[in-house]
Amino acid sequence: MNKKIWVTTPVFIIFSIVMFVMASVSYYYNTTIFIIELLAAIASAATVFLSTYKFGNYVSRIIKSASGAFSIMNQSSLDLINVAAIVVDDFGVIMMCNKNFTQKMCNNEDKIGETAAQFIESKDIRDYFNHNGIDVSYNDKWYVAFGVLAENGGIIYFVDNSLYKANSDEYLLSRPVVALIDFDNKSEIERASDENVCDQISIFIESKLQEWATGMKGFYKKLEKNDMYLVVIEERNIQTLIEQKFKILETIRNIRINDVSGATISIGIGHCGKTLRECELRARQALEMAHGRGGDQAAVNNGEGYEFFGGTSKGVEKRDKVRTRVISAALEEQIRKSDKVIIMGHRFSDLDSVGAAVGLWSTIQKGMDMDAFIAINKNQSLAGSVISNIEKSGLLDVFIDEHTALNEITERTLLIVVDTHSPSFLEFAKVYKKCKRVIVIDHHRMMVNHIENAMIFYHEPYSSSASEMVAELIQYLGSDNLTRLEAEALLAGIMLDTKNFVLRTGVRTFEAAAFLRGKGADTVEVKRLFSNSISTYKTKYKLVSEAEIFNFYAIACADEETSDIRIAAAQAADELLGIENVKASFVMFPTKNCINISARSLGDVNVQVLMEKMGGGGHQTMAATQLKGVTMEEAREQLVQIVSSINSEQVQNQTESAGAESAFIEPQQ
């Protein structure tokens, strides 16, 4: 009934009259045709009459029902209501409306007989009879629609609350947002250039940040401590910043003075807090997350989760070892307070995880004369060669399973987690939950879901590996008892995560390797730890040979699960990076109940960001994820869509950058 029924009724009446005329004409030509047409005309007239009569009674019944519900007896009484009101039938057709409705909502147009769906957001009219008011928008105004049910329809009236809605929206949009900004690598730039150049870069960063804050009509303040900046803006600016993907990061990154460049900032955004203090606390947490993920990015914290933007730069190595010395002193203190120490890594432990654990075990067990164990699932470990070498040397009590570890735990037991900081990735979750004293040592970029109850959270995303971090720590804790086998385990962990000193290597990486070499680590023996069986070798090269290149990304899919598929997939992902024009590689393989993806890059692509979009994580050049409840085809399609979207964003950013001037200052004479 989208049209007015009584507008169509005259058409049917005219149609019936025409049929009577045609029957009359047929009387002179053919009696049979005349009788047929006459009967049809009578039937048509009777149908029109009955339909009009029934519709009139139907309208009258609805109006009387609604009138009885509201003590309204006629149109004039309905017009006395001070808000817009309509009477509708069960199908939502407007039977009657008052002047307020016609004037305020219809621009004096007659809407009787039309559907009420154009004025309400729900097509089901009954929704308005089952609620105490529903917000609707019509003609750029906001109303609260109230409905009261009658026998064969009901009445809906609209209360104009546009002013309240505008005030409410303005309140929400003007809520304060706190941004804390840190000059990530000022100390590194100071070392690489003279003081004058560093000061110029600092001044330029300050001017750009002040310009950025002023453009959003915000408040800007340089904090005296630690080269940090405070910006307070309004909630209305957040969406714009997100859409622009925090272009200020790229602006700072493009600063170049006297051929010195590479300055980066980290931004922590806190919003949706009830008070300014709460927003400031969230901003600090967000800034910490940005630092933990390598810097050069913005983290937005709304109290329910984080969003991350940027993070395309490679992390800059922190050459200062003061923090390592402080951490080692705190670590030793906690170890001395314990009755025993359990060391645990991540599921499907690799050479880095096991190497770091072995290094700590040696220092604690032999150097400090404390009981220490490594909790590990040997059947699922990818570092079987290291475990085998340690046990062959006569150290049979080093590695324990979950059941034994749970029995060893007491109130004073210390758990040291290495090479991961996420509870969901731990080797044995029950061991972690039972231990009340926890320490974390990890180098992966910070994840939102991280261990929060750690007494010491030693997190260095600039470090190449957990083995490098442990090699530095044990130099302060005491390394006299470190044997050749243990030094080789640590060196193997470093070589694994750096791809034989190619990726994420810095001065401290080679210093740690030199220290381990001095402890007797044999590079030939370390190389043997990476040896594969012939079946693993065949599986790896089968994956490489069947890989496809998609927009500078190599994607390979394994047909079935094999006993060595995890090792083969990881190595195949590394091999694919050697193909010309491949910026990142992804190897997909099935296990019992999920599809696994192993991702690698040489640093041009942040595979951690890609894997996070699929529920995983990792490092900028090495990441992974697991997808449950999907087929290989579905998982591949999901990966292709994410890679395509990231690639489109990069092309767009490159186009925008080509049209914009980079921040460049001519050298001073």
Image (cartoon, grey):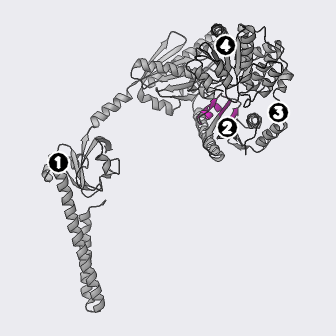
Q: Which residue lies furthest to the right in this view?
A: 524
Point out the tag, 2 or 3, that comes first from the N-terminus. 3
Whether tag 2 and tag 3 are in contact, CB under 8 A, the answer is: no
Report the residue marked by disc 4. 340
Q: Nearer the viewer, mark 4 or mark 3?
A: 4
Report the residue marked by disc 3. 532
* Secondary element at image label 2: strand
Residue 85 highlighted magenta (yes or no): no
Quadrant holding the C terminus: top right
Q: Does residue 460 appear anywhere in the picture?
A: no
Q: Is residue 504 above or below residue 73?
A: above
Point out the tag, 4 or 2, that comes first from the N-terminus. 4
Q: Which amino acid does label 2 sit on?
A: Ile
Q: Residue 70 carries which label?
A: 1
- Mark pair 2, 3: CA separation: 21 Å
- Mark pair 1, 2: CA separation: 65 Å
Residue 57 lies left or right of residue 229; in this view the side is left
Q: In which quarter of the image is residue 644?
A: top right
Q: Nearer the viewer, mark 2 or mark 3?
A: 3
* Secondary element at image label 4: strand
Quadrant holding the N terminus: bottom left
Residue occupying image coordinates x 20% and y 68%: 53
- Say which of 125 and 411 sits in front: 411
